[in-house]
Image: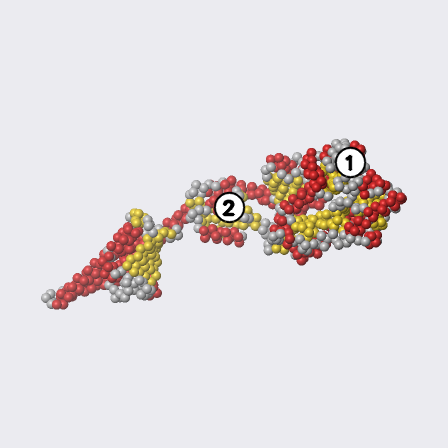
C-alpha cells in the first residue's frame, strides 16, 4: 500500500512517466492526472479531473469498471483489468490497467500500460518511487544484456514465476522458455536487437515449481541508452486469460458450428428487434444470397404483420433474462404454418446484451397432433354413440373408459367406476364365465365372444372381447330378446322339422339363423352351410330370373307378406323350381326382427306347365299352318281349279278346229300349271313343318354359305353392276341346317336384285357378328326400292304377299326366310321405306 509521502513523490512521476498514471477516488472519480495520460487521450488535465474513470472507457466496459472498483475496495493487493480507453477523437486505446489502494483509504493509484508504449525505463525513475513501482508491481520487470542474460530482475519475478530476483541474475532468458516456443522467442530476441521496441504476445515461461505460465512481454531496446545499456522487458502473466480465451474460442467455435449448421432458423436480435446475425437456414428460407442483406434489418420485415406485436413483446420478455418459448401460426397456400420460437437471452457480465431466437417448423407435428386429437375425439364420439355398451380396461384390469350405453345398460355410475379395478367393483364375477373368458383373451391374445346371464339387470348379454398389448376392449349388447326368441324357435323347430316343406328363418337383414330338415332334404344345404349367409347367395344360379330376385328384394324392403316362384339350385347343382311364402316377424315396438320363408318344391308342376306350354305352342303353330293352308286353298288353289273346270267344260262345247278351242286349251294348260305350282308350294310348306322337330343340323361356316348363295347371282349382279360388301367376323360358325341358311341368303339376294332401283347402283351390305345377349346376328341391307312398312303391316312375311305390282313374283321369298329362321329357333326383324332400301336383322342361337 502506498503511503501519503510516496503519493507526494509520485507527483514528479506524473509529469515525467510515459505510462498512463492517475489517482482516483473510492468511487472512481478522477483526481490527479499524469501528463502522458492526458496527452495520449487528447484531453487537458482539467477536463479529465472533472470526470469519472468509467467515462474514459468504451460503453460496453462501463460495468466492468464498476466491478473493478468494487473488487479493489475488497482487496488489499493490486488488481488489474484490460480496458479499452476512448480518446477525445473517438479512437480506442488498449490499456492494461492496474489499481493499488492508497494508504488511508483515500483512493487508488492507477497505472495503465499501453500496448505500443516504449518509454518505460527504470533508469528514468527516481529510486524511491522506482522501487515502489518495480518491487511491488505484479508485472515482471527485467533487463537483459545484448546476449540475452539477465542483468536485473524486479520483485514481480518472484510473484510471477516464483524465483527471487537474484536467482535469475546471470542466467539466460531462453532457459525459461517452453521448447515449443523457443524458436519464436529466439526470433523475437533477434528482432528486438534490430528494432527499438517489440511486443511478444504469447510465450510460455517455466516457473520455479515446474509449471508453465503464459506471459505477454513488451521488449524495449535501450542498449545504447546511458545508464541502462540493456533490453528492458516488461512482462505480465496471461495464463488465466489465455485459458479463458482458449475456452471462449472453443465455445465460440462450437456455437458458431451449431449456429451455421443448424437446420432450424436462428437469428440474433438487439433489444429493439434489429437483426445482428442470421444463420444459413434463415437465408435459405427467405431466399437471401448473403448475411449482408439481413444484418441491420428489423425482424418485422420478415414476419406477417399479425404476429409482429407478439414477437416484439416476447423479445422484451427475453431481455429481462428469461428464456421464452411460444408458438405462432402463419397462413399459407395450404392452410397455415406453425412455428415454435425459443428466445434465449445472451448475458454478459450480468446484463442481457442480445437474444438468440431459434425458429422451428412444427407444422407436421402440430397437424399430426391435431389429427390424433381429432381421431381420439371422433373415436370417443363413436364409442359414445354406438348402440353397443362398451368399456376399456388397462393391462391391470382398471377401467379407462365407459360409454353412456354401458352406464345405462349395467346401471353403473361411470364417474365413480373410472380408474377402479373391474374385479374390485364386481367381486361376485370372480371365477365366473366372464372371469374365465377375460383371462383366456388376455393370456392368448385372441378375441372372443360368449353370452352370459347378468342377474342384477336380469338380462342376457352378448359379450365380445378384443385384447391388445395395452389392455382389453369389451363390447356387449342386450341379447335377452334374441335368446328368448331362440328358445321359442327351438320349440317351433320341433314342429317345423316334421314338415316336408323347407323352412328358413333369417334376421331382419336377411342372414340365415335357422333352417329345418325339410329345407336340407330339398336343397342339400345344412344349417351350418347357411348360417350367417343370405340364402339366395347359395341357391340362385344361371337360370334364376333377376327380375324375380329384384321383386323379392323390393317386397322384403316393404316388409309385407308375399309369394314368389323362381328357379333355385340344389347343393349338387341340380336345377329345381320353388314356390316361397315369405312373411316378416315384427317386434312389439314395430321393428322387423326376422323373416320366415316356407319353400315348396314345384318342379313337377312347372315341368307339367312347360309341357302344356309346348303343346299349346304346337297347337298354335298347327292352327297357324291350318289357317295358312286354308288361305292357300281358298285363294291360290281355288282360282286355278275353278278356271280349269270351266275351261274343261267349255272345251266340250266348241269346235276342236276353231281358234277358241286352241285358246281355251292353252288357258286350261296355264291354269293346270298354276295349280301345280300352288301344290308344290303347299308341299314345301308342309315338309318344312313336318321336319321342324327332326331338322338335320351341322356346324356351318356362315361366310361359306353366304358366298355359295351369292354364286347363283354373279351374272345378275354383273349385269346391273351391283356391289356386295362383307363384314363377317372370321371363324363364325353356327350349329344349324345348312340348306335353310343357304335358302335365307339365296332369297334375300334374290329380292335385293329383283327390287333394285334403276336410277342408282345396287349396293348390298352383309354383316355377321356374335353377341353374348343375342347369339349370332346377321344383318342384310340393300338400297333398293323398299316398301311402306305401315301399309305392309303384319303381311311382310305372309305367303303370297307382294308389295311391288310392277315386278313379277309369287310372294314366297320372305315367307321362306322367316319360316327357316323360326324353324331354327331364331327371329327376324325388318325395317324399310320406299326408295330407301330394306334392312333385315336375323338373330340365331
- Compared across the picture, whether 704 is left or right of 407 comes to left
Colour convention: secondary structure
Name the N-terminal-most of marks 2 and 1: 1
| Residue nearest the observer in this picture, 351 or 320 | 351
Q: Position of residue 592 (x, y in %)?
A: 57, 50
Give the mark toward the camera: 2 or 1: 1
Q: Position of residue 303 (x, y in %)?
A: 66, 55
User: Quick one: label 1, few (<14), some, or many (20+) residues within 10 Å?
Assistant: many
Q: Position of residue 81 (x, y in %)?
A: 78, 44
Q: Which mark is residue 695?
A: none
- Compared across the picture, whether 138 is left or right of 571 comes to right
| Residue nearest the observer in this picture, 316 or 326 | 316
- Residue 177, above or below 706: above
- Name the secondary structure under disc 2: loop
Residue 443 location, quadrant: top right
Residue 1 location, quadrant: top right
The count of marks equals: 2
Residue at 47% of width from left, 44% of height from top?
A: 538
Residue at the extreme left: 657
Q: Which mark is residue 151?
A: 1
| Residue nearest the observer in this picture, 510 or 417 | 417
Mark 2–mark 1 Cα distance, whole angstroms, equals 119 Å
Residue 34, visible in the rendered structure: yes
Residue at 89% of width from left, 44% of height from top?
A: 4
- Name the secondary structure under disc 1: strand
What residue does disc 2 label?
534
Q: Position of residue 475 (x, y in %)?
A: 62, 43
Q: Are marks 2 and 1 in contact (CB under 8 Å)?
A: no
User: Quick one: label 2, few (<14), some, or many (20+) residues within 10 Å?
Assistant: some
Residue 813, visible in the rendered structure: no
Residue 192 location, quadrant: top right
Amino acid at each position: 500500500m502506498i503511503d501519503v509521502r510516496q503519493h507526494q513523490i509520485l507527483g514528479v512521476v506524473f509529469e515525467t512517466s510515459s505510462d498512463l498514471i492517475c489517482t482516483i477516488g473510492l468511487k472512481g472519480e478522477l483526481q490527479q492526472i499524469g501528463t502522458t495520460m492526458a496527452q495520449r487521450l487528447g484531453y487537458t488535465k482539467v477536463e479529465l479531473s472533472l470526470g469519472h474513470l468509467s467515462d474514459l472507457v468504451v460503453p460496453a466496459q462501463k460495468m466492468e469498471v464498476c466491478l473493478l472498483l468494487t473488487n479493489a475496495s475488497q482487496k488489499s493487493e493490486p488488481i488489474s483489468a484490460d480496458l479499452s480507453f476512448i480518446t477525445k477523437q473517438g479512437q480506442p486505446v488498449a490499456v492494461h490497467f492496474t489499481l493499488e489502494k492508497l494508504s488511508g483509504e483515500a483512493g487508488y493509484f492507477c497505472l495503465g500500460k499501453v500496448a505500443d508504449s516504449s518509454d518505460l525505463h527504470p533508469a528514468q525513475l527516481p529510486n524511491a518511487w522506482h522501487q515502489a513501482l518495480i518491487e511491488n508491481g505484479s508485472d515482471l520487470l527485467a533487463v537483459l544484456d545484448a546476449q540475452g542474460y539477465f542483468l536485473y530482475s524486479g520483485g514481480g519475478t518472484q510473484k510471477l514465476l516464483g524465483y527471487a530476483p537474484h536467482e535469475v541474475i546471470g542466467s539466460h532468458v531462453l532457459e525459461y522458455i517452453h521448447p515449443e516456443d523457443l524458436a519464436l522467442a529466439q526470433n523475437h530476441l533477434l528482432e528486438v536487437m534490430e528494432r527499438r521496441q517489440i511486443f511478444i504476445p504469447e510465450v510460455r515461461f517455466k516457473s520455479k515449481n515446474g509449471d508453465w505460465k503464459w506471459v505477454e512481454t513488451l521488449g524495449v531496446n535501450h542498449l545504447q541508452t546511458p545508464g541502462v545499456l540493456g533490453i528492458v522487458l516488461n512482462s505480465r502473466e496471461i495464463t488465466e486469460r489465455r485459458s479463458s480465451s482458449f475456452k471462449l474460442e472453443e465455445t465460440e467455435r462450437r456455437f458458431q458450428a451449431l449456429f451455421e449448421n443448424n437446420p432450424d432458423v436462428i437469428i440474433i436480435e438487439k433489444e429493439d428487434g434489429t437483426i445482428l446475425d442470421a444463420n444459413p437456414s434463415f437465408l435459405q428460407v427467405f431466399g437471401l444470397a448473403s448475411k449482408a442483406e439481413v444484418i441491420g434489418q428489423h425482424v418485422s420485415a420478415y414476419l406477417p404483420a399479425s404476429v409482429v406485436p407478439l414477437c416484439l413483446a416476447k423479445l422484451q420478455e427475453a431481455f429481462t433474462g428469461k428464456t421464452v418459448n411460444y408458438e405462432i401460426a402463419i397462413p399459407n397456400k395450404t392452410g397455415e404454418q406453425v412455428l415454435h420460437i425459443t428466445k434465449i437471452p445472451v448475458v454478459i457480465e450480468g446484463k442481457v446484451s442480445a437474444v438468440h431466437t431459434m425458429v422451428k417448423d412444427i407444422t407436421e407435428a402440430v397437424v399430426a397432433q391435431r389429427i390424433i386429437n381429432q381421431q381420439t375425439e371422433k373415436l370417443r364420439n363413436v364409442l359414445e354413440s354406438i348402440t353397443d355398451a362398451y368399456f376399456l380396461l388397462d393391462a391391470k384390469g382398471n377401467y379407462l373408459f365407459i360409454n353412456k350405453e354401458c352406464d345405462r345398460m349395467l346401471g353403473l355410475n361411470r364417474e365413480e367406476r373410472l380408474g377402479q379395478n373391474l374385479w374390485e367393483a364386481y367381486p361376485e364375477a370372480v371365477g365366473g364365465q366372464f372371469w374365465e373368458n377375460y383371462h383366456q383373451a388376455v393370456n392368448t391374445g385372441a378375441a372372443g365372444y360368449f353370452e352370459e346371464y347378468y342377474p342384477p339387470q336380469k338380462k342376457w348379454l352378448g359379450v365380445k372381447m378384443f385384447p391388445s398389448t395395452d389392455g382389453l376392449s369389451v363390447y356387449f349388447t342386450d341379447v335377452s330378446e334374441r335368446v328368448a326368441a331362440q328358445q321359442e324357435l327351438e320349440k317351433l323347430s320341433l314342429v317345423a322339422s316334421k314338415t316336408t316343406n323347407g323352412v328358413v328363418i333369417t334376421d331382419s337383414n336377411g342372414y340365415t339363423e335357422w333352417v329345418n330338415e325339410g329345407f336340407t332334404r330339398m336343397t342339400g344345404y345344412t344349417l351350418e352351410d347357411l348360417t350367417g349367409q343370405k340364402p339366395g347367395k347359395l341357391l340362385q344360379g344361371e337360370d334364376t330370373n333377376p327380375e324375380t330376385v329384384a321383386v323379392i328384394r323390393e317386397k322384403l324392403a316393404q316388409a309385407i307378406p308375399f309369394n314368389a316362384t323362381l328357379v333355385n339350385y340344389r347343393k349338387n347343382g341340380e336345377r329345381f323350381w320353388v314356390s316361397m311364402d315369405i312373411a316378416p316377424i315384427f317386434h312389439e315396438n314395430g321393428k322387423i326382427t326376422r323373416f320366415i320363408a316356407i319353400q315348396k318344391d314345384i318342379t313337377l308342376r312347372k315341368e307339367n306347365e312347360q309341357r302344356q306350354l309346348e303343346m299349346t305352342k304346337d297347337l298354335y303353330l298347327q292352327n297357324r299352318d291350318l289357317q295358312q293352308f286354308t288361305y292357300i286353298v281358298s285363294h291360290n288353289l281355288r282360282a286355278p281349279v275353278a278356271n280349269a273346270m270351266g275351261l274343261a267344260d267349255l272345251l266340250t262345247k266348241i269346235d276342236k278346229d276353231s281358234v277358241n278351242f286352241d285358246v281355251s286349251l292353252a288357258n286350261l294348260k296355264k291354269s293346270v300349271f298354276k295349280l301345280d305350282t300352288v301344290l308344290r308350294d303347299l308341299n314345301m310348306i308342309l315338309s318344312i313343318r313336318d321336319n321342324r322337330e327332326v331338322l338335320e343340323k351341322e356346324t356351318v361356316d356362315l361366310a361359306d354359305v353366304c358366298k355359295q348363295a351369292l354364286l347363283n347371282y354373279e351374272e345378275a349382279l354383273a349385269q346391273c353392276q351391283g356391289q356386295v360388301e362383307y363384314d363377317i367376323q372370321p371363324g363364325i360358325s353356327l350349329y344349324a341346317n345348312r340348306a335353310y341358311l343357304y335358302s335365307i341368303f339365296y332369297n334375300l339376294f334374290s329380292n335385293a336384285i329383283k327390287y333394285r332401283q334403276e336410277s342408282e347402283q345396287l349396293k348390298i351390305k352383309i354383316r355377321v357378328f356374335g353377341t353374348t345377349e343375342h347369339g349370332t346376328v346377321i344383318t342384310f341391307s340393300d338400297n333398293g326400292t323398299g316398301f311402306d312398312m305401315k301399309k305392309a303391316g303384319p303381311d311382310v312375311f305372309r305367303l303370297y304377299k307382294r308389295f311391288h305390282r310392277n315386278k313379277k313374283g309369287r310372294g314366297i321369298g320372305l315367307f321362306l326366310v322367316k319360316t327357316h329362321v323360326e324353324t331354327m329357333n331364331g327371329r327376324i326383324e325388318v325395317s324399310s321405306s320406299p326408295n330407301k332400301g330394306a334392312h333385315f336383322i336375323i338373330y340365331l342361337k
